[in-house]
Image: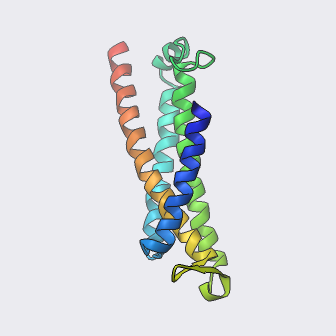
Amino acid sequence: MRKSKKILFVIVSVIVVIAFAAFLSFDNSKAFESIITFLSITTGFTITALSIIASSTFSKQLYSIEEAEDNSKTLLHTLVYQFKNSTLLFVATIALIFLYYFFVEDEKTWRIAVILNHNFSFPIILKATIWYLTILSFWNFINLLLLFSKFVIKNATKN
């Protein structure tokens, strides 16, 4: 079941990136500096939150509770996994923005194809991917913030 969800997520992601690149005219790189700033802050938040979780006495209790969906993992494993994957998403998005800034100068020299009167080139696909990952990063950050607030409240009630 999990594998089919991951495959479906990848297929939907590819479709969304193509839609961003061609049909929704998501060919905009002016906001990338602001996105880097936001993602840098979110990366700092996740690292700080992980250090708070690691130093919490409540994390020991989470380590002793099995995950409901996968009994080979504990709740602490799941919590750390979510923070780790989010941090990797934030850093990957920043890396793609740097890749765009440092290696993409002239979009016309990168033309790949024209489909249904829409230009597809490496820079356009890269920008669409960056925007898609940015939207996922916003979503991930909101989920992490909600998850961490629950952790803080549970930690406070246990102490």
- Please name whichever residue, 100 or 159, is drawn nearer the observer in this view of the structure: 100
Q: What is the x, y in percent for residue 36? A: 49, 63
Question: Residue at horizontal 48%, vertical 17%?
Answer: 57
> Residue 28's quadrant in the figure?
bottom left
- Is 156 displayed left or right of 32 in the figure? left
Where is the C terminus found, in terms of image quarters? top left
All told, the count of numbered labels is 0
Q: What is the x, y in percent for residue 135? A: 43, 56
Q: What is the x, y in percent for residue 33? A: 47, 70
Question: Residue at horizontal 45%, vertical 64%?
Answer: 35
Q: Is residue 159 visible?
A: no
On screen, residue 36 above or below 104: above
Q: Residue furthest front?
A: 116
What colour scheme has been applied to the protein in the rendered image?
Answer: rainbow
> Residue 4's quadrant in the figure?
top right
Where is the N terminus found, in terms of image quarters? top right
Question: Residue at horizontal 57%, vertical 25%?
Answer: 77
On screen, residue 25 above or below 56: below
> Residue 113's quadrant in the figure?
bottom right
On screen, residue 74 above or below 29: above
Q: Is residue 145 visible?
A: yes
Q: What is the x, y in percent for residue 39? A: 48, 56
On screen, residue 50 above or below 13: above
- Please name whichever residue, 92 or 37, is drawn nearer the observer in this view of the structure: 92
